[in-house]
Structures are given as structure tokens and as C-alpha cells.
Amino acid sequence: MTRFFANANYDFIGIRKYAYGVSALIVIPGLIFLALAGLNYSIEFTGGTLLQVEVAKPVDVASLRSGLDAQGLHGAEIQNFGAPNEYVIRARVAKPGTDANDTQATAAAVSQALDAALGSGTYTVVRTEAVGPKVGGELRQKALLAILLSFVAVLAYLAYRFEWRFGLAAVAATAHDILATIAFIAVMRLEVSLTVVAAVLSMVGYSLNDTIIIFDRVRENLRKHKKEGFEDILNRSINETLPRSVLTHGTTLGSLIALTIFGGEVIRPFALVMFFGVFTGTFSSIYIASPVLMAIERRWPGPAARGHLGAAAAKPVPGERKTAPVG
Amino acid sequence: MSIRTRLLIIAGLIAASIFFLVPRTITLRERDPQTGVMMDRTEKKVPLKLGLDLQGGMHLALELDQSKQVSADPKRDLDLALTVLRKRIDEFGVTEPLIQKVGDNRIVVELAGITEPARAKAIVQRSAFLEFRITDKTNALEKVLPAMDRTLRSLGVKSETGAAGKPSAVEQLLGGDTASTAAKPDSGKTAAKPDTAKTDSAAAIAGVPSILRSLIQPSGAAGTAIPGEYVVPETAFPRVDSLINLPPVARQLPRGVTLRWASAPTSVGTESVRFLYALDVRPIITGSNLEDAAAQLDPLTNGPIVTFQLDRAGGRKFGEETGKHVGDYMAILLDGRVQGRPPVIQSRIGRNGQITLGNKSLQEAQDLALTLKAGALPIPLKIVEERQVGASLGSDSIHDGIKAGLAGTLLVVVIMLAYYRLSGALAVAALALYILFTVGGLSMVDATLTLPGLAGIVLSIGIAVDANVLIFERIREELQHGKTVRLAVDEGFKHAMNAIVDSNVSTVLTALFLFQFGTGPVKGFAVTLIMGIIASMITAVFVTRTFYLIWLDRRPAMSTLSI
């Protein structure tokens, strides 16, 4: 039988300091970038008008832009989208002098500019999205609420199934994943649409899934190997679940590669976010969730871990406490 | 549970999934929109409803537009608008439209597979407020024009004819710069006409430069004098419109008279003009008394007309009023614009009448008849959100999704077979059932498949094998500990259960929140995710287990497992 990492015995927890470094190298510059450049929100969240058009001949971007400027739609984005004869025009401001929440005036103004720049009849509008700022604001609120509430629900479930120490550690790992993913979205200049929010939430589910599988093994090993130190129990559990991790991440990445290549332009940001999520989720399950669990157990030992902490306490790691609030 | 029972349950699940996936034709008893007769209609029930982003269509979110008219009771007006929209869209003939109230201030309309979005939008948005008013016979507007001009001058608005230089800032503000520059050469042209010259000279005598007087002329010169009808050059229309609507100017009009524009420009000779009407403030009747409307071609002119019929009370009132006004002219207004030139009232009119539409298409006449019949919107609606996907883009998305799904499945199958050999084959068989159960389950709950949902299915194919992987890895560990094949399989399933349940429940929890807070497409994603997890639990835990049981039953003495 083929086995990857059978009887692996890597010292994952021992090298956690390096892993923190790697994480910091990704997250900190990402967050700085986020603070400086912000996120590229889609029309759905900011409000505005998007037209996807299929054209017969290449678009003279400059003349289209000046046409849009003449309509008072300054700073519109004109982008090639997927195929060379498809363009997306995004106008985030409303036509001056019109009610921004009444999306029709702006949509009509974009059409007029298209008629002027391309000639009417030489293009077809294949997709329109027009969202008033009011609706956009509501959507933003809903998305945030969905993320926060799902967080609370998962924490409650984990607290019920395991105990609060495990739940807290899992949430710390998830918080790290969300930060890392937002940094990734900012650096890659991906458009934050509802679909991307869905990807972030799926990523959270996937990452939690991974953490839970390791924690499940930790719980089992705590019962099975009464004499082992907590750090050794963590290492053992991670190593034992390693073949599963490799395989499941492999098949998931397989699906995501297929989606990225074949899934089309609208789905690509979703696939990319999930793709990154698989890596950060795996990473955080091993290097955030497990060490945080260890730190929590050392400070507030739970009944399950009590017998194991003596061995671990015999070789205390300096500076351990400082790493507790990671993420 | 015996193998037999297990197989029966699996067969039942397969049969149920297939049942929900077979397209069926169902018979619906519905009222025929044209004749009003109840008719049986067979409808093809497709296994999976496609979302607007996959089949093409339009999603609109509407709110009351209170910028011109403030609603006294927004809640009631929204409910009224909802009923009116339902009627209109029923008549428009879209299959399975969705029209619902969201929150307490918004209406969402979803029309799948429509090919003329602009037309649909017009039908949804048109207020369709019909009214009839007698034109003013007292020359009220002509009399107050000098007063209006004086008011305008006191406001700092200058004339554009004569020696006026550049338009002042106020004027630009009021008239809009495109309108005022365009108006210049044209108003000069108007001035060349004899009757204009007369007014101009009158103005010169009074020492008052004319502003509105040079732009608004009684239509008498055209020969068919309709009282209360005035001519404005089309190019000056936006400017005049903004000037006469300035409150101090509008106040000059005598009580009981109001101004309304014609709905479209008319050509007089080489010029394009717009009629302006001075009308009685009180409509003699409104569309609320309308009982029926239909589009027809006028047998004389071959132009489209809309004929209508009033209800009994409306007919009585209309007859009374028209009887009093024989010889007067009656303007027909739709949404505040006069349709065609007002006809003269020959005699008392009963319940039937017609609206001449001029150079419009028969289809526009049909749309008008449809909206009139469905009733007027109490308050105009504004579109606060619009999403529209062309049918071709939708079908491209489906192709892309299927391609991605096939490629993803292929990759997963290869990985599972290469790694787990025969056991991998069991997992692949279970995966096939997984896909069947997921799609069948989605069809069962009448879920709508959206583009993110499709992506969710593709993604879940990769994740679905996780449960199998967990079980297989456990079995391998048990085998390594020297357990017999049978015991290892039993223990493997037992020990993997905890992890499978916990991890799936947490994913379902996040999906539930997505469902709760997401909009259409994202809701579709959440539903596929939840259905996928349920199907994956069934296939990995129950189906694969059954396969193993059969396998071990056939070869009780098996000492090594292909895993």
C-alpha cells in the first residue's frame, strides 16, 4: 500500500517559533498593504453600476472614458474581462444631479456613453448590475453579521462538543485565517463580492474542519497515552492525522484547480480565495490552534490535560505565554 | 442491520434521487390571460431550477419614489404596488416570476429568461396613471406670460434672443448648459415666424425683453386651433420646462389651471416642436374607473390605439362630464403627459373610449393596455438594485461549471484510485452516489442552482472524499496495529465517526449563516453546501460501510485489504 507520511514523527510544535515568523511575514505586510490600499469592494457593496459588454471590435478605452466623463461618471473602471471581446465597465459614482439610490439614471448614462464611443448596435450588454448605495450598505452589514454570528455559533458548538479551551484555540486559528485571507485578498487586488464573502466563510468552515480533526485526535490521545507530555501529544496527533491532511487537501486542491482553470471569470476569485484558504487553514490548524491550545492548557489546565502538563512543565519553553494571543 | 436491509435503503435513496431528477410534466389549471377562461396548461418541470445568473434574467429591487409625490401611507402604497405589479407581470407572460415584498419598504421582482429587459423594466416602472382633463379656454397662459417674464427677470434670468450675450450663471443653473446653448439658434428661427415677430414687437414696445414669450406660442397658427394648446421648440423644451416649474413663476398661473407637456415631440414642417397644454386642474375622470383596455390598430390610420372601457360608475360620471363639455377639447394624460392632441368632444361619451398613440409600435400599445388594465401604481417606483444576466452568458457559465466539475472529479478519482486502490474504487463508487444524492436532494427541496452553487458542488466533490479518507486512514492504522481485516474495518469506522460528525456540523453551521444573510446566488451556494454535507455523510458512512460488509462477506478469510 502507498502511504505518505506513514509513522511520520516530525516535531511540529518544536519549530512553532519559525512558523510564527512565516505567518508574520505573510500577515503583517498584508495588513500594512490593506491599511494603505484598502479593499477593492465590488459594486454590490459600494453601490454603483456595472455593465459587461460583448463588442464586435476592440474598444477604444480612452474615448469611452471621455464619453463617461462627459456624462459626469468620473473615474469609471474599464476592464477587459475574460475573453478579448468582453469588457466590464464599473461606475461607482452616480450621475450628478440624480438620486444615487435610483440606479436607472446612471445605467442610462453608461449606455449613452457606450453608444457614443462604440456606436449603438455594435455591442451587446450581457450583464448589468446596478446597486444603490443604500442596498450596498445593507449588504455590507449583512455580510459582516454572517461572519460574526457564524463565529459565535461555531465557538458554542466546539465548547459543547469539546470544552471551551479547544473552542477558543480553534477560534484563534480561524481568526488568523481570516486575517491572512483578507491580507491575501488585499494584496491580490481581488474584488470583494458576495461570492468572495461566501468563499471566506467556506474557508472558515474548511479550516475549522481541519482543526477539529486534529483536536479530535488530541482528545483521544490524551486518554490513550496517559504518560506523555502535552507537547508530545500534540505532535503525535498532528503526525497521525498527517496522511489524512495530505490526501484531503490534495483532492480539495484538485477541485479548486479545476475551478480556477475552467470555472470562468466570475468564479475565479472564489476559487483563488479558497485555494489560499486550504493552505492557511492547514497551517493554522497545526501552528496556531495547537500551540494556542497548549498555552491555554498551561495557564488554565483542564481536566483532560492535567496529567500531561507535568511532563511538559519539566521543560518549559521560555516566552511561551507571550504567544498566546496569536491572530 | 443486515446487508440486505442496507442495500434496500441504498436502492431506495437512488430511486428517490432519480425520481426527483426526471423531468416531469405537470398539469396546471390556470386562467387564460386573454380570454379569462380557466384552462389546463401542462408545464415541464425541470429537475433543477436554474438561478437568474445561469439561465439569464432580471432581478429588480424597487422602492417607492417619493421625490415628486410623498406617500401618505407608505405601507399601504407598497402593498398596493405589489398587487399591481403581480397583475402586470402575469399579463406580461413570464414563466414563474417572483414578485415579493422584502422587509417593509422594498419589492423584489425576478423575471427569468426574459429577452427584452428594457421593455420589462418599463412595464414594472410605469405608473400608468390615466386621467382626462378639459383644456383651458380662457387663454390663461398667454395672459400671464408677461408677468412670468417679469418674475424671471427679477430672478436674474436673461433672454436668449436679441442681443443677450452669454447666458448668466443663474440661467445655466436653471436651464442646464446643453439646453440653453442648443436653444439659441432655434429660438432665433422661431422669432422669424410672423406671429413670433408680433409678440416680440409687443415686448419691444413695453420695453421688456421676452424670455418665455419668445419660446411659448399659442398653437393657433397651425390652423386647427385647440384652446389651451401652445407650441415650444423641441430644443427649448428642457429649458422652458425648468423655467415654468420655478415656484415663483408657477404661482403666476391663475387658480384652476395647470400646465402639462405632450408626451412626445411633433414635427411641424421642418421643425420639431413640443406642445404645452394649459388644462383644468380637476380631472374629469381617472384610470381608477377603468375596467378593461386593449391594443388595436386604428382601421383608418393604421396606427396603434388603445381602446378602453370604464366601469359602470365611471361610465356614468364620464357621460355626465362630457355631456357638459360638448364642443370642448379633452386631453388624455398618462403619467402627467398628454397623449396625442386633445380631441374635441362631439357628444356625450359613455363607457368606451380610445387613446391614439401616434407613431408608436403596436407592442408599445399592448404594453400600455396591459399596464392600464392592471391599474396605476399609487406612487412611482424607483429601481434601487438591478441585476441582469444575458442568456448566453448564463449558458456559458453552465458549460464552464460542468467542465470544471468533470475535471475536478477526474482529478479526485485519479488520486483516490492511485492511493487506496480497491478501497479507493469503493470510495469512487460512493462519490458517484454522492453526486447523484446531492443533485437529487437539491431537486427535492426545489433549490435553485446558481453560479456560486455550481462552484460549491465542484468544490464539495473534492471535500466529500474527506470522510472516506478519514475512515480509510483509521482502518490502515488499525491494520498496522495488527488487527484482523474485519476488526480493523469495524474499528476504523467507529473511530472516525467523531471527527466526521464534528467537522461536518461546524461546516453546516457556517453554511446556515450564509443562507440566512446571503442574497440569491449566495443562498444557492449555502444550500448546495448543506445538501453536499448531508449526502457525503450518507455515502461515506453508510454506503461505503455497506460496500465493505459485502466485500468481507464474500471473502471472510481475507487477510490483507487493498487499501
Image (tube, coloured by chain):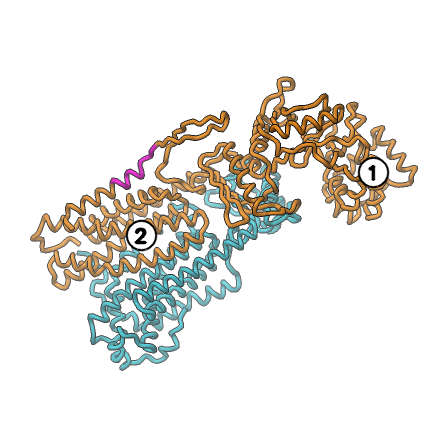
| Vertical side of A166 occupied by B184: above or below | above
Instruction: For the residues labelled 1 and 2, say whether their Cβ atoms are less than 8 Å apart.
Output: no
Q: Give the range drawn in magenta.
A: B15-24
Q: Can residue A117 be seen in this view?
A: no
Say which quarter of the image contains residue A162: bottom left
Chain shaded orange? B
- Quarter of the image that includes the C terminus of chain B: bottom left
Residue located at (25% from left, 49% from top)? B414
Label 1 residue SS:
helix
Q: Distance between the residues labelled 1 and 2?
A: 76 Å
Please tell me the numbered disc located at residue B145. 1
Image coordinates for residue B2, horizontal then vertical, percent: 14, 49
Q: Name the residue under label 2.
A: B533
Residue A279's mark?
A: none
**Helix, strand or loop at mark 2:** helix
The residue type indicated by label 2 comes to Ile
- Residue at point 37% right, 66% down? A171
Residue type for callout 1? Leu
Q: Which of B192 and B524 is in front in this view?
A: B524
Task: State which chain disc 1 sits on.
Answer: B
